[in-house]
């Protein structure tokens, strides 16, 4: 290929890769644009193959809490790669990582490493079914738990962006085992539990929903889920693939002081490499093979390079927990800039996003009523001014420790100078 600018690369890609991308939202479809192709990234900045530089608030959809290519993380991966890339046999790093996560996250007594968030959640759900001997699960509209069958109903994230409520290709019988409740609506959970509670293996929830935009749990919601699962003998699974090590070193369960039975991790835990995990109560985790009868395996599970990146990232965070105060304040400044323009913002810590709507956003239905055309105009304006936010109304904006004074003041200025027609309420 001679020309390698984004436009020609995308045209080539369209012929060879479905939709030109390896994950749907990357295609920029809902903002009516074609994607840029990335050359490299460093700290808060992303550079495309056309020579543009952007302040990056996507951060690879969450992993980049330290910014891109943190020198210590890169060094750790380089050093370990000299010793070999994969062995399919246990390594010391895996034990260290399990130890560290168990120290940092309140409910984790045992941990199993896998390669993606999808795999972590799929495995945790299988485990919940194996442990309880029940088939059904309850999930919430607008929560995304990866793309495994049965979790792709009203799943937020790319499905919401692409206006696909339910994926094709999922057997009806499978989807029937997933019961849908409304986020922040305790009544909707109570009704389902009254009817089917004794067949429910688990309630799975994003403790802060961050795949329909950012939607915080209302006061008492997570506590209610804890109580009702205990009442019916079902498990509570927190999908902390985004919130884990993001809202604080102990994740959402520490932030909200609610203890789930099982937790899934992804994104930050891999420090930018493919790594995810599920863990929780020892008696439940002991049901996983080879100790127990719930099967789950992986050729590249606990890959040494991924473990090195994750371990280094978590160590840096654990040794510098002031970073959480820093990114919370930084996100607060960006929030204020939107508010000055009369734009609604939802925020928890360093997770935030503007919603182009007049009403409070507290669930899937209210999120869906946001004006995605206005969002597309806003996205284009930000990009043209050197700021990359997620190309969808229904994703979060991620602030990292690498976003410094210069980047933040530029970001706030660009927001404050936004043409009124994009933000008029
Ligand atoms: C990203 C995400 C997943 C899926 O993780 P992948 O690594 O993309 O498979 C699952 N749950 C939540 C909450 C996520 O944000």
Image (cartoon, grey):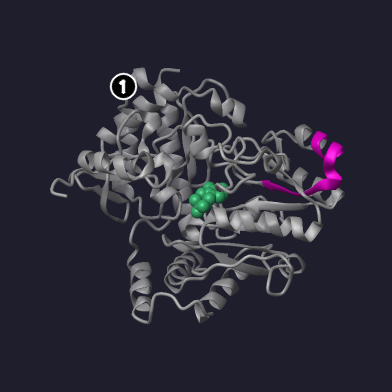
* Ligand 1 under 8 Å from disc 1 Cβ: no
Is residue 341 visible from the viewing direction of this image?
Answer: no
Q: Left of 88 or right of it: where is 414?
A: left
Which quadrant would the C terminus be assigned to in this image? top left
Residue at left offset 46%, top offset 78%: 87
**Residue 93 in the image: above or below residue 379:** below
Q: Residues within 10 Å of mark 1 (few under 14, many from 20)?
A: some
**Residue 66 in the image: above or below residue 417:** below
Magenta region, residue range:
191-204
Disc count in the image?
Answer: 1
Is residue 289 visible from the viewing direction of this image?
Answer: yes
Residue tagged by mark 1?
419
Quarter of the figure with residue 191 = top right
Q: Left of 407 or right of it: where is 103?
A: right
Residue at left offset 66%, top offset 50%: 256
Q: Main secondary structure of the magenta part?
A: helix
Counting from the top left corner in percent of width and height, residue 69 is at 33, 61
**Residue 352 in the image: above or below residue 300:** above
Q: Left of 335 or right of it: where is 387?
A: left
Counting from the top left corner in percent of width and height, residue 381 is at 30, 29
Examine the structure image and report whether residue 168 is included in the region drawn in magenta. Answer: no
Residue at left offset 28%, top offset 47%: 406
Counting from the top left corner in percent of width and height, residue 130 is at 76, 59
Examine the structure image and report whether residue 201 is included in the region drawn in magenta. Answer: yes
Q: Residue furthest left?
A: 2
Q: Secondary structure at mark 1?
A: loop
Quarter of the figure with residue 212 = top right
Camera-side residue of 295 and 362: 295
**Residue 327 in the image: above or below residue 281:** above
Counting from the top left corner in percent of width and height, residue 203 is at 73, 47
């Amino acid at each position: 290929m001679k020309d390698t600018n984004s436009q020609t690369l995308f045209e080539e890609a369209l012929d060879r890769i479905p939709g030109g991308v390896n994950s749907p939202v990357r295609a920029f479809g809902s903002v009516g644009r074609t994607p840029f192709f990335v050359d490299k990234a460093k700290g808060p900045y992303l550079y495309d193959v056309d020579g543009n530089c952007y302040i990056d608030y996507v951060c690879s959809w969450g992993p980049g809490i330290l910014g891109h290519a943190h020198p210590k993380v890169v060094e750790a991966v380089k050093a370990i790669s000299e010793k070999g890339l994969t062995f399919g046999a246990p390594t010391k790093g895996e034990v260290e990582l399990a130890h560290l996560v168990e120290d940092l996250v309140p409910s984790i007594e045992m941990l199993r490493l896998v390669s993606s968030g999808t795999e972590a959640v799929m495995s945790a759900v299988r485990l919940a079914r194996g442990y309880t001997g029940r088939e059904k699960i309850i999930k919430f509209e607008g929560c995304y738990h990866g793309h495994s069958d049965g979790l792709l109903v009203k799943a937020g994230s790319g499905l919401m962006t692409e206006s696909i409520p339910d994926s094709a290709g999922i057997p009806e019988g499978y989807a029937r085992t997933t019961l849908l409740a409304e986020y922040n609506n305790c009544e909707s959970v109570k009704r389902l539990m009254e009817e089917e509670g004794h067949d429910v293996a688990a309630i799975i929830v994003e403790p802060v929903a961050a795949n329909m935009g950012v939607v915080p749990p209302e006061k008492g919601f997570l506590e209610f889920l804890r109580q009702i699962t205990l009442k019916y003998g079902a498990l509570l699974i927190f999908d902390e693939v985004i919130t884990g090590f993001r809202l604080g070193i102990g994740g959402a369960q520490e932030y909200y002081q609610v203890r789930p039975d099982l937790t899934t991790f992804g994104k930050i835990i891999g420090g930018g490499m493919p790594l995810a995990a599920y863990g929780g109560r020892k008696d439940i985790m002991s049901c996983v093979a080879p100790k127990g009868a719930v099967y789950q395996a992986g050729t590249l599970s606990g890959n040494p390079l991924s473990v090195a990146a994750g371990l280094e990232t978590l160590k840096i965070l654990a040794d510098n927990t002031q970073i959480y105060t820093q990114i919370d304040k930084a996100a607060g400044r960006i929030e204020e800039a939107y508010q000055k323009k009369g734009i609604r913002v939802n925020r928890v810590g360093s997770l935030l996003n503007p919603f182009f709507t007049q009403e409070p956003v507290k669930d899937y239905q209210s999120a869906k009523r946001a004006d995605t055309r206005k969002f597309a105009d806003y996205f284009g304006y930000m990009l043209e001014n050197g700021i990359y936010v997620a190309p969808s109304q229904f994703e979060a904006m991620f602030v990292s420790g690498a976003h410094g004074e210069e980047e933040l003041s530029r970001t706030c200025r660009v927001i404050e100078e936004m043409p009124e027609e994009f933000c008029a309420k």
